[in-house]
Image (tube, coloured by chain):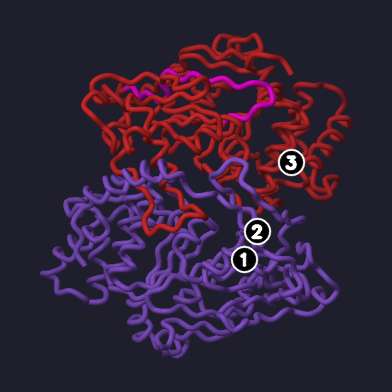
Chain colours: A red, B purple
Amino acid sequence: MTTGPLIEIEGLRVTFQGDDGRVTHAVDSVDLSVANGATLGLVGESGCGKSVTSLAIMGLLPKQSAAVTGTIRFDGFDLLDVPDATLRDLRGNRLAMIFQEPMTSLNPSFTIGDQITETILRHRGGSRRAARERTIELLRRVHIPSPEKRIDEFPHKLSGGMRQRVMIAMALACDPQLLIADEPTTALDVTLQAQILDLMRELKAASGAAIILITHDLGVVAEVCDEVAVMYAGEIVERAPVDELFANPQHPYTVGLLGSIPRLDRRTSHLATIEGMVPNMANPPAGCRFAARCPFVENACTSSPPPLAMLNATHASRCIRAPLERLVS
Amino acid sequence: MTALLEVEGLVKHFVAERSVFGRPTAHVKAVDGVSFTVEAGKTLALVGESGCGKSTVSRLVLRLIEPDAGRIRFEGRDLGALDAEQLRAFRRDAQLIFQDPYASLNPRMTVSQILTEPLALHNLVPAAGRRERVDELLRLVGLEPRFARRYPHEFSGGQRQRIAIARALAVEPKLIICDEPVSALDVSIRSQILNLLRDLQDRLKLAYIFVSHDLAVVKHIADRVAVMNLGTIVETADARALFAAPRHPYSRALLSAIPVPKPRAKRSRIVLEGELPSALNPPSGCRFHTRCPYVIARCRSEVPQLREDGTGYATACHRTGELPGAEAIVPSDGGFSPTLEKLVAAFNTAEASGRPGVIS
């Protein structure tokens, strides 16, 4: 294992130019890094910019409408500044992604075997026969029963859980160093979800790949992540090691999220709710973006944007009122 | 006290394949002998994996589809014997909320039209008073009456689900079937809708059948739980008893897999090997035997009956009583530290002070 992060994102900013000329700030000055063999959870609700961040890393945002600035350093490359040909060599090879919807991200007119061998042949070359053997091996690794038969089936013959495992097998085809998983278990039943999470843990242990896991499910984050970054309205509002984040959250938004999920060990008639709406990102507020919905808001919060400040060596919060415990003692 | 809803031996098979002469050759046994009761003002949750028949049960209960066998009694009356007129009256008493608030509201109708339609259909409120009733319904679900003139596309997912709830409440039902009502919503919005459903239950004495695959949500909202596997109920019990110590191996596997928001939570997960068998051709004997870690020869041949233990806890397993203790099955998330509890409480008080006026 090498020292230093495998991927380092600095000042990532993504804006979308709308047809009406308005500019939407989807991601604003995001800094992230993931070390080899580590799993980073990227958490937030719909529209917070977590998926756009992952698409920016993969270079999959439309060039006409999306303006991406900042740097994404991956193994000596700046992914925002490499020729398309280099990016194509990296993608599916050393950088891989598992997309959210297993129902729509497989091509219905090709067998699953064709779709996985295509990746292997493109990046590794070799004979069709060798690629096919590797594909069967990959399907076996993701626990698909009788892979020698399944390899020639079309996606519609498989259940949702199996399709998701096929997606994972495809992402792993070339032993990627970085795996981005966008809501990999959202569409699945708990029993399958548990299998997929086990599988991801197993793979990380076996290959030492780094994983960026994008999810809105804090239960999933607690299960598999080492570090967590919470996003709100395009910004990272809190970043901490996983134990620290769940035991001692230091941004009000994180507190609200934790309070709004039903817990097994807590009997309460009412869950916490975060009132109000996400700000319009075509015209973000001048101060803290969460201020309008925050129960701890004070005047200083709305005057200037708060910095993402380090509270200790590993825990950062974008809240000027942190540490929060002094507010309730 | 008789139960609000009693379901007995409900069966529904769908034809999956027909011969060239149109004779059915294969059936999907979506629901195969399901019985349960729902008390007035209480919540029964139906849980299970995709394809276990929980949504089919909810449609059968409303007679949106006809059962092949079995009896459904609502307030003591047999639903199968109702004529068209009586069935319409029953539909006033039982309503449905769907999973996807983007698909369940007509995009060409304003909120006011959506909410007025059931009032007019059942002739509940004279035409002159309907506008007032619409305002009242909107306030009941926490929306402002001025929204009545807008169209569904102008609302967020959570607001749409509130409109769908208001529509269900328009006819003053006694039973609402909620089919995955919060699965499509973001976490913070989900908690608002769950709070709303609970408030409405307390205020209007509603009974819910809550269909969900999210077990933490079920623990939060349900009084009783029925666990379904391949068209049959394998276990039914009070929510508290079930989550304290599930007995059926399938319930144990489900509950042990709940992801909890606590890193390194202690758990003894039971991993189910193999794929979910098809309802087209369910396994012989106990339908869970192909995936059950405790399977014995008897399970493969003999169908286990749902047996009640005298405390309202019923399990369909030949080996109940022989299985190892179940105390540590459900993972523990440890709740909150006192400081975090206080911080979370700040969100609750903010909500209480800002909550719109509610009229019952």
Q: Is residue A14 above or below residue A139?
A: above
Residue type at mark 2 is: Ile
In x, y percent, where is residue A207?
Answer: 76, 28
Task: Find residue A25 and report its image quarter.
Answer: top left
Kindly tell me whether residue B14 is visible in this rendering. no
Mark 2 or mark 3: which is in front?
A: 2
Which residue, given by chain and number where applicable, does mark 2 sit on?
Answer: B329
Q: Is residue A225 above or below residue B235?
A: above
How far separated are the C-alphas under marks 3 and 1?
A: 41 Å
Which residue, given by chain and number where applicable, does mark 3 sit on?
Answer: A112
Is A29 inside the magenta-drawn segment? yes
Task: Find residue B241 and report its image quarter.
Answer: bottom right
Q: Is residue B257 above or below residue A237?
A: below
In x, y percent, where is residue B4?
Answer: 41, 82
Indicate the secondary structure of the residue bearing disc 1: loop
Indicate the secondary structure of the residue bearing disc 2: loop
Which residue, given by chain and number where applicable, does mark 1 sit on?
Answer: B245
Q: Which residues are magenta?
A: A23-40
Q: Say yes or no: labels 1 and 2 on the same chain.
A: yes
How far separated are the C-alphas under marks 2 and 3?
A: 37 Å
Q: Tell me if label 1 and label 2 are in contact, CB under 8 Å.
A: yes
For the image shown, how many numbered marks are present on the structure? 3
Residue B64 is tagged as none
Q: What crowding class fits label 1: few (fewer than 14 Cα within 10 Å), some (14-19), or many (20 or more)?
A: some
Left or right placement of residue B63 versus residue A142 in this view: left
Residue type at mark 1 is: Ala
